[in-house]
Amino acid sequence: MSLKAFHIFFICVSTLLAVGFAAWEIKGYMLSSDPLQLVAGAASLIVAAGLTLYGVRFVRKLKRERL
């Protein structure tokens, strides 16, 4: 596996983990009403969105520069 392929794979796995963590924290907030869990879930969703944008830009850069 090339370094570029591993990087794309790692971005995808990290995004899925961030979304899963957000779902877990939001579910915990619904059960306990702890505001810290809601903040952690929201922050994790923001991280997932950032990782998605980064991944899209990375793939576009690879296509544009034909790396």
Image (cartoon, helix red, strand yellow):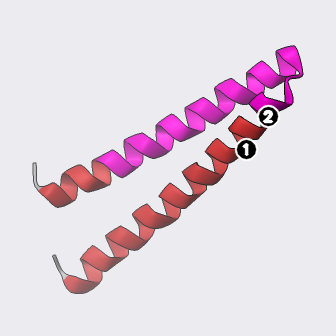
Magenta stretch holds residue 53: no
Looking at the image, is 12 positioned above or below residue 24?
below
Looking at the image, is 18 positioned above or below residue 66?
above
Give residue 59's quadrant in the image: bottom left
Q: What predominant SS class does the magenta segment belong to?
A: helix
- The extreme top residue here reads 31
Residue flagged by tag 1: what amino acid is it?
Answer: Ala
Q: Residue 53: which disc?
A: none
- Residue bounds of the magenta highlight: 10-37
Looking at the image, is 67 positioned above or below residue 50?
below
Determine contact: label 1, label 2, CB under 8 Å.
yes
Residue at image position (70%, 37%) is 41
Q: Residue 38: which disc?
A: 2
Return the x and y of residue 54 as percentages of the image width and height: 45, 65
Return the x and y of residue 66 as percentages of the image width and height: 18, 81
On screen, residue 29 versus residue 43, left or right, reads right
Q: Residue 42: which disc?
A: 1
Q: What element carries label 1?
A: helix
Neighbour tally class for label 2: few under 14, some 14-19, many 20 plus, Cα within 10 Å: some
On screen, residue 38 versus residue 57, left or right, reads right
